[in-house]
Amino acid sequence: MIGKMGAAFTAARSAMLGSNQRDAARRDISEMRGWSKRPGFAGTVSPGDIDLILGRARDLDENNGWINGGLDRRVEAVIGGRIQLSAQPVYSLLGRDINWRMEWSRKVQARFKVWANDIERRCDARQRLTFGAMAKLAYLTYLRDGEAAAEVRDSDRGLSNPTNIMLIEPERISTPDYRVHEEGPMLRNGVRMDADGAAIGYYVRSGHPDDPHASLSATRWDYIPARGPTGRAKFVHVFSPRRVEQMRGISRLAEAMVPSKMVDRIDRAELAAALKSAIYSFFIKSPGTTSDIEEALAPGSEQTENGWIDDYLDYRGRNPVMVDNASVVHLLPDEDVVQPNRNSPNSNYPDFVRFVLQKIASSMGLSYPQLSQDYAGINYSSARTLLNEIWRGFIEDRIFFTQAFLTPFYAAWLEWEVANGDIKIPGGPANFYRNKSAICSVEWVGPGRGSVDPMKESSASNLDIAAGRSSTIEAILERGRDPDDVLAEESFYLAAREAMGLPPVNHNVKAAPDASGDQSDPGDAESAVANGPAKQPTGR
């Protein structure tokens, strides 16, 4: 009796839940049947999975032109070849004014620029790259491998500031063989954590696991704390988490791997078909059997009823008929020339490749034209839309990566500068640690957004500045320049022109109309509002 009641209750409960069940949780529809995936735990990722995905990502970078080019386009837009420091201490919390901040920032930036661009590359532990080039390589590693890592070192190389950076391949971060049994909440995949899950140190293998010429010391793991006694960064590890408890990064190319290999296979198949079509220009269609042809053409064969064929072939071999350097071959009796149909490339091939490349571009945070370099059919409106949509992602990634990866290096460098007395801090060196975040506040100036129509966009920028919706500083930053440099140059050359008796530069001069005589460009009206009456340049 109890069993029957329990079964009835269960059925009633299931029916009740089923009536309110979301489609996403159903199992009785074809789209959801067989799709069972547990949420999983993000804190631990199988080392085997990490290595496999990492190897595939690097293989795509090395052997897939689309992926290689897409990675380069993103690195060029986000970091560029020479990312610049813009020191922005929160002067109000330090009891100072804007004038102090500007003077202090100029000195800090000048000293950092010399260190970052040292001609002997002493900012790099390997002495191969400038700071900007290291930032570019680290961001490429972060995109392709899913994470970037570096150790902050102090080496006496003749500079007053010994800070230097050692970039590390992320797969060298791993749990030592002799500590595998400790894997758990306090140690995961080479990352040592405190009770709250904050990374406090890393186990770094002294040699690369795949180095074929590694010494015995390559099997040694060094424990490097995340921070030193003063809080100064010792090891910097950055990845973009997609899960709250994630501790290691996964390649951004993971979602693009399947479509990338599909394009590779289709490309090879189409190229092979085109090559065969080019090589096999035509076939000889013969009425004879294979044995008949073999008899006729075999060396030393006996004369057949058409015995003159052997003599004819010998004669034509020694005396070919030539027409404009093209050899004319006489066929055997009843032979015919058949030209095969050329079906390459497949008519659906361009549309299919475009569809797949759009998926790859979306997963990489690029637009299809950027990835494919196919700008056919792009007009001003669509180009601006693409640029605006993609640029937000570039800026978000630049802010995240530079603040997480580059700012700790700047703070480590600045700590030495303050300790040496080369940079003064309000309240003395001890105040550096009390107000470290305020003093080390910084922005990183990367490449500018660029423009699709410089005339229209400059006019719009002038309107925004005139209306107070933006500032000259923002306009300069959008072009990838340091506002201090631009304004200092402007001030210098204005003074130089005045000293030489030259009039000030007239910033209100508009470009002359084009030869077509079309002066209806809305940018002209905008420019007139922003800059005042236009003054046309005088001709000679």
Image (cartoon, rainbow, N blue to C red):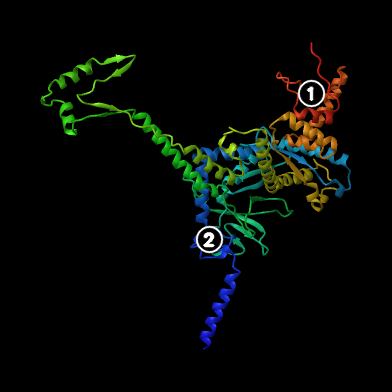
Q: Name the residue under label 2.
A: 178
Residue most extreme to the bottom: 1
Measured as percent of width and height from the top left, residue 253 is found at 55, 47
- Which element carries disc 1, helix, strand or loop? loop
- Which element carries disc 2, helix, strand or loop? helix
Measured as percent of width and height from the top left, residue 124 is found at 64, 40
Quadrant showing the C terminus: top right
Q: From the viewer's perspective, is residue 47 above or below residue 529?
A: below
Question: Tag 1: Cα neighbours inside 10 Å, few (<14), some, or many (≥20)?
Answer: some
Which residue is drawn at the image coordinates 51% and 39% (left, top)?
A: 351
The amino acid type of the residue labelled 1 equals Lys
408 vs 503, left or right, is left
The amino acid type of the residue labelled 2 equals Tyr
Residue most extreme to the top: 540
Q: How far apart are marks 1 and 2 (CA)?
A: 72 Å
34 vs 480, left or right, is left
Which residue is drawn at the image coordinates 54% and 81% (left, top)?
A: 8
Q: From the viewer's perspective, is residue 496 above or below residue 418?
A: above
Measured as percent of width and height from the top left, residue 50 is found at 53, 53
Between 73 and 321, the one nearer to me in the picture: 321
Question: Tag 2: Cα neighbours inside 10 Å, few (<14), some, or many (≥20)?
Answer: few
